[in-house]
Amino acid sequence: EAIAQQYDIHNLIVEDILSINQRPKMDDINDSIYCLLNMLYYNDTTTTVEQEQISILLGKNYVITFQEDARRDVFNPLRDRLKLANSKLRQNGADYLAYSLLDLIVDNYFIVMESLGNCIEQLEEEVIRTRSTPRTLARINKLRKELIVLKRNIPPVRDLINGILRSDSDLLQERNMKYYKDVYDHILQAYDLTENYRDVLMNIQDVYISNVNLRMNEVMKVMAIVTCLLAPPTVIVGIFGMNFDVIPFAHTHLGFYLTVFITFLIPAIMLWIFKKRGWFRRSE
């Protein structure tokens, strides 16, 4: 608030700076251009995408940035370039510095997406080469949540850059607009890559469901074979177990052995027929 008072920053911008978890946006207020977006980081320990809100305020001959966490950001290469007296960053205007900040943030999106892409590739190989498990489904859902974080950030940043390109503010020099167009091209590539990852993840989920259904079909096939094999012996034993005197061979010594023989013979014939028809082949 003290900085806002010193540079005559509009109250609406101050309110946006102090409020977190907002949608990325761009505003042109009081001869200043305000950009709000998120820096993204990939946490290798938890394999999650973390985000941090940053506000970039472009004014006449100055750029002010506000961020949540002072311990980390993506601007170290920019700081190194600012230390060089003859660097291009020092020779150009404030709008070029604002472009450099946005460019580093967008470029870091690709680093995050590359890490997510590696996880998706490993998951795809696991689903295709090995049997799917509930743990696999949990990983699929987790990666879908991380892609949602990207989806919530990349399209609004695309609109943000597009708003700068359409702005007629005097703070933006015509010679530097080509750099903003380059950032716009990068964010479009990031958006397309996110869509590709989403499609791949949906395909992986379809393969997982197919594997689960295939395993269930295998189980049902085994149960169906067992049921078929047990049906004839059950009928035969039930007939010969009835309490009637007219049953053939019921009162002879040969009747018992004949019943047992037929009880085993019919399932054996059925097994041969099932094998001949390929029922015992494992689905690939």
Image (cartoon, helix red, strand yellow):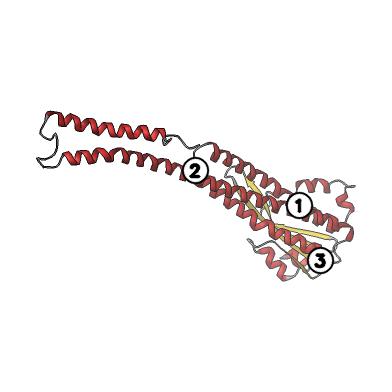
For disc 2, the neighbor class at 10 Å (few under 14, some 14 to 19, many from 20) is some
From the image, tell me which residue sits under label 3.
167
- Image quarter for residue 276? top left
Quadrant, the N terminus: bottom right
- What secondary structure is found at the residue carrying circle 2? helix
From the image, tell me which residue sits under label 1.
186
Please state which amino acid type lies under the numbered disc 3. Ser
The one of 38 and 270 positioned closer to us in this rendering? 270
- Whether tag 3 and tag 2 are in contact, CB under 8 A, the answer is no
The one of 207 and 91 positioned closer to us in this rendering? 207
Name the residue rendered at 54%, 36% in the picture. 129
Q: Is residue 123 left or right of residue 192?
A: left
Q: Is residue 88 left or right of residue 223?
A: right
- What secondary structure is found at the residue carrying circle 1? helix
Q: Which mark is residue 119?
A: none
Distance from disc 3 to disc 2, alpha carbons, whole Å, reads 52 Å
Distance from disc 2 to disc 1, alpha carbons, whole Å, reads 37 Å
Q: Is residue 256 left or right of residue 282?
A: left
From the image, tell me which residue sits under label 2.
211
Q: Could you say where residue 205 lies in the image, as x and y percent from the top left?
A: 54, 48
Q: Could you say where residue 126 lies in the image, as x and y percent from the top left?
A: 55, 38
Please count the marks in the image. 3
- Image quarter for residue 274? top left
Please state which amino acid type lies under the numbered disc 1. His
Query: Which label lies toward us, 2 or 1?
Result: 2
